[in-house]
Amino acid sequence: MMLFGTKEFDSAELAPDSNMRKIEDVETLKKKIEGKDNFVLLAVGSSHWTCSCWQGFHTRNIVPFQKQYGFLFHYIDTSLLQGEKGLPFKFGDSYANLVIFKDGKVAYQQNDASEKSDFVSSYSYFRDWMLNRVMLPRVYYINKEQLSAKYDSTQEFTIYFSRLSCGDCQYLERGAYKQWYLDHPNNVEESYVIDMDAVGISKVVDPEGNIWTRTWDGSGNEYQQQAYAQYMKFKEDYGLSYDEEANPVGFSSGVVPTIYHINPDGHGTKKGDVIDMAGAFYNESWSGFDREAPTSTVTVSDSFFDEARLGLEALSYAEDVETKNLVGLSFTVDPVADPDWRHSVLEPYETPLLNALLDHAVGQGF
């Protein structure tokens, strides 16, 4: 299943690299493979972008398929792959290779080397070829402008706030979040995800076109500081950060992964009562951990799912979950045997809460 699609490119201008998401470096690609992700990659030859065969294939097949199904194609320039050994797919400077990954392994691959082939020359053939090999997306990436427009409407929706670089998000997405959608192939409402690592949220562009990313503490040059301020404002504006009066459902200064169901008021309000279901996962604070000891008894000292917040209407979906208050849970952990203990010990408790939220926010008839 290709869990995530995209509507980010709905108004994109046609260009050789349009309607696709760029993979910036080979390490990012390797992490997707090692993470056993399902995704579709176009390895485009570094000298192939201006070739008529690529432009025809891209315009005739890639762009229409992306638009018709909200499909998310990733691409990487083969110049970044030169000298890399052990990559499980073919690539070259003079063609584009489309690779379908399932659970991090190559399931299918085909290229645009022959302009006369049906795969290249016929959209109906390409569409059927793809539909016979992939499951269409269930959740769609949108950009900041599209998200803002949804708050301006009166149509209810569910939004997942994420970051592509967030380890907690990856753990959730590759585990319980993906599994919920696998368990519910039908009767699920369309929902959305926004990447908060994007330009305009946690990144800014300087006058020379250079992209600057915020630092964690707001330090750095003027553009990094601007990016930090912009990121913090986004979290405040969209109700991720806690405010006792204006936004009691927020958590700390705002964290991801967070999922909100929004019931807009038609006036663009983005926090407070318009958030009628909410959950923030795997952002607990801990006491008792001893880095020098082989084992530690650790206790959750703070969590989104605490006694006070559980009294809010936005968490009423958790009513039937057996363990709702995670503060005070204790575990004996061995960080050598389980370096990811912060996730693994809480998974039995966080997953039922996530499932309950998704059942109520996007589930229909079950």
Image (cartoon, rainbow, N blue to C red):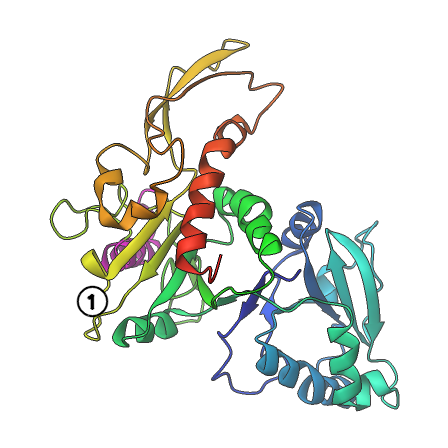
Name the residue rendered at 64%, 57% in the picture: 25
Quadrant of the rendering where the N terminus is positioned: bottom right
| Quarter occupied by residue 213 | bottom left
| Quarter occupied by residue 235 | bottom left
Disc 1 marks which residue? 269
Would residue 275 appear left or right of 163 to someone viewing this image?
left
| Quarter occupied by residue 4 | bottom right
Q: Is residue 91 at least partly visible in the picture?
A: no
Highlighted range, magenta: 217-239
Residue 90 lies within the magenta run: no
Q: x%, y% of residue 141?
A: 49, 67
Residue occupying the far front of the picture: 365
Q: x%, y% of residue 174?
A: 59, 47
In the structure shown, which secondary structural element does the residue marked by tag 1 occupy? Answer: loop
Q: Amino acid at mark 1?
A: Thr
Question: In front here: 223 or 289?
Answer: 289
